[in-house]
Image (cartoon, rainbow, N blue to C red):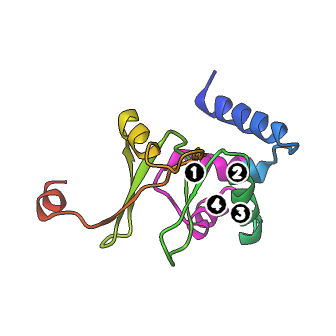
Amino acid sequence: MSTATHNAEALAQKLADSGLRSTPQREVVYDVLLKKRDHPTADEVFARVKSGLPTISLATVYNCLETLVQCDLVRAVNFERSPTRYCPNLRPHAHFHDEQTGKTHDIDLPPELLEKVSSVLPVGYDAKSVEIIFRGKATKTVASGG
C-alpha cells in the first residue's frame, strides 16, 4: 500500500471516528501538511493547495485545519502573537522557534524527560498533553555549518 493511500485511509478513519467524512479539500490540506513538515501557517497551506484546487478559499483551508486539529490528526502550535502553525508530528515532542528565520523545528524528547516533567504536576492531576517551546536563534557555528 502506498504512503498516500495509507494517509488517505488514516484520514478517512479518524474523520469517521469523529462523525465526519473525508472530502477532497481535507485530503489535499492534510497531504500538504504531511509532504512538507515545516510547520506552515494557514496562509502558507492555502498557497500550497491553491495549485491543486484553484477554487478553494482561505476560509475552507481554515475550516479543514480546524477539523484536522479537532480530530487529532495535526497539532496547532502557537508562538505568542504569531499566526498559528500546523504540525503533523503527533509523537510527544517540543518545538524550537528560530526567532531570526521564523523557522520551527521539532525536537524529540526522551520519555524519561516527559515523565520527569509530568511528575511536577499537582497531586491528583494528570496532563493530557505537554507543550514545550524553545525560542532563540541559531549559533554562528550552526548557521554557517548547515
Q: Position of residue 115 (x, y in %)?
A: 43, 37
Q: Say which quadrant the N terminus sits in.
A: top right
Residue depicted at 50% across the width and 75% down the height: 82
Image marks 4 and 1: residues in contact by CB distance under 8 Å: no
Give the camera-side residue of 18 and 24: 18
Magenta segment: does it hold 136? Answer: no
- The numbered mark, 2 or 4, whose residue comes first in the sequence reads 4
Give the camera-side residue of 33 and 78: 78
Element type where label 4 sits in the image: loop
Q: Quadrant of residue 86?
A: bottom right
Image marks 1 and 2: residues in contact by CB distance under 8 Å: yes
Q: Position of residue 46 (x, y in %)?
A: 64, 65
Mark 4 Cα within 10 Å, few/some/many (few <14, many 20+)? few
- Foreground tag (3 vs 4): 3
Q: Which residue is mark 3?
A: 61
Distance between mark 4 and mark 1 Cα atoms? 15 Å
Q: Amino acid at mark 2?
A: Leu
Q: Which residue is mark 1?
A: 33
Mark 2 Cα within 10 Å, few/some/many (few <14, many 20+)? many
Element type where label 1 sits in the image: helix
Q: Quadrant of residue 73?
A: top right
